[in-house]
Image (spheres, helix red, strand yellow):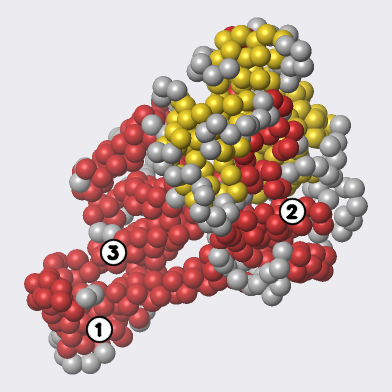
Amino acid sequence: MAGGYAWLLAAPAAFLALFFAWPLVRVVWRGFTDPVLGLGNYARVFGDGPYLRVMLNTIETAATVTALCLLVAYPVAYVMAKTRGRWLQIMAALVLIPLWTSVVIRSYAWMVVFQRRGVLNDLLLATGLVDAPVSFLPGALGVHVGMVHIMLPFMVLPLLSSMRAIDGTLLRAAEVLGASPTKVFWRVFLPLSLPGLNAGVALVFMTSLGFFVTPALLGGPQHMMAAVLIEQQANTYLNWGMASALSSTLLVVTLAIYVVYLRVSGGAADAALVR
Amino acid sequence: MSSAARGAPLAIEGLAKQYGDVVALAPTDLTIERGEFFALIGPSGSGKSTLLGAIAGFVPPSGGRILIDGDDVVAVPPYRRNIGMVFQNYALFPHMSVFENIAFPLRLRKASEAEIRARVERMLAMVRLPGMGGRRSNQLSGGQQQRVALARAAIYDAGLLLMDEPLGALDKNLREEMQDEIKQFHRQIGATVLYVTHDQEEAARLSDRMAILNHGRLVQVGRSRDLYEAPRNAFVASFLGEANLFAVRHMTSTGGGLAVDTREGIPLAALRGPAGAINGAAVMACVRPEAIELARPGASGLDNRVEGVVDDVVHAAGTVRYRVRVGDGFAITVRRPSRLQAEDPGVGERVALSWRADDTLLILKE
């Protein structure tokens, strides 16, 4: 940043310091001091009991949602990248329009689908696949489907921008040089789409770790995620120290996974180059 | 790596491509000899890229056959045609090192690691990039990138190499240097080369023979010199070098040649008419600028004589280019070697132009 323009950052910096950095410091501090100074809260987080299980479940759910998003989004982005004109506009609209609807409304919509007398059960009963309504809610299936639905655009968009930047000549060159369409994909297209894939995976995984509304509505106590637990500690039990310790743990876990991911994805790119 | 006579002959029979009503390539026949360096030239939109794309397998032809080493490859997908190709923007894989780019075709062909290493090193030495295998392609200059592309296209001993304006992105000096390298490279590998360019000078420097395309049609095929000295029509004459063109009204045979009456009002003497008996209206006369002598008015000259006023003089790298206005609004271009003398006529001076009858080429209008 050129020195002459640094003052432009003063206002946003002050805003962040006041409304982001300071509360964050307070949260971390409170985790060690409320109700008494010490590691008591953290001993409970990592001790026997539901807290550690919720943390692990959070990471597992975020990973599953990310993997499912990638699986669904990659073919969608691939087709979009190969399409031009009107059809591309239609597909882009289909990807983007859900973003205009609030997460709460979309999560409730999934409740309508999954509940005991919901759309899915009606369908299963009508086709005779089951004799009695299946209990989907609360449960992992609802949480996964709801979260994948909400996170999908955040995977499709970076993938799409990465794929559209791939020079078509490279694909044709690979083909003349002897690569069948399958090999063109694995050896040229996929590696060149990795920047978008990495961005999408990071974005979806990080966001999923802190997801609240969908797991709160569809998950229930058996499939609780960290954000729901934190909210419960703060609002229901007024246990601010425990809520702070859990928040700090989630923050550290998120940052740690992000750093590891940067290493791994960067390392993979280097390895491909040296080989 | 055997280099002797491993080029594949290429034969094109009635190859055509249409997009709806638009003819990108009219039915075309062309035969290219084993190991020949053949250039395809023409303005943009002339069909040369369509022809190249059809041979590579990217453009499915509307009809016709493509025979590489005697086998029709029209139904064969690009990756099984075993053709080498060099692209204008190099098309090096940015996610691979120089070594891996060149090794790519060998890996696809399941060569052993030891063989790959040996052949890539040898190829790197051949394109004068020894020890550069570990670089990324974006760390190389344009000329170096094009050498990597050449190496990658040639490493699997394809009998036919396609080059699509490979030097189009380079500046003039580097382009001439690379032309020499490509020529030498061709001698070493012995493959048949089909080279697309819009630069007729580049085609002349590199190729054994060339074909000129215009509006999706093959206009003429031959050696550079043949095309220059005996262009089939006005398009070829003006595409290859400069040409003074006269619209012919009619021709009458005289004792030793033809007396030509032109629309420009300048009577011309020629030796031979165009190939085939054709009436005057479909014929043009072409006189090359360097065939014309320049003298003081009234001096005795050659078979064709016309006087005019110098309109413009340009000195450029060894040649002087005069534009001489003759009659009303018609100018003739004359090119003479530049010599260290002060007697060159200047702008506004009256001069006499003359040239020999056999330098008046009678060619088809179209």
Q: Is residue A97 above or below residue B304?
A: below
- Which residue is labeled 1 in the image? A41
Question: Closest to the observer: B259 or A234?
Answer: B259
Q: Amino acid at mark 3?
A: Gly
Determine the residue positioned at 71% across, 72% down. Answer: B130
Which is in the foreground here, disc 1 or disc 2?
A: 2
Give the image location of residue B19, x and y in percent. Answer: 55, 21
Question: Dot 1, how many residues are within 10 Å of its Cα: few (below 14), some (14-19), or many (20+)?
Answer: many
For the residues bearing labels 2 and 3, Cβ distance under 8 angstroms:
no
Give the image location of residue B144, x and y in percent. Answer: 61, 64
Answer yes or no: is residue B96 visible: no
Pinpoint the chain carrying mark 1.
A
Question: Closest to the observer: A243 or A271?
Answer: A271
Which is in the foreground here, disc 3 or disc 1?
A: 3
Which is in the foreground here, disc 2 or disc 3?
A: 2
Give the secondary structure at mark 1.
helix
Q: Earlier in the sequence, mark 3 or mark 1?
A: 1
Same subunit: marks 3 and 1: yes
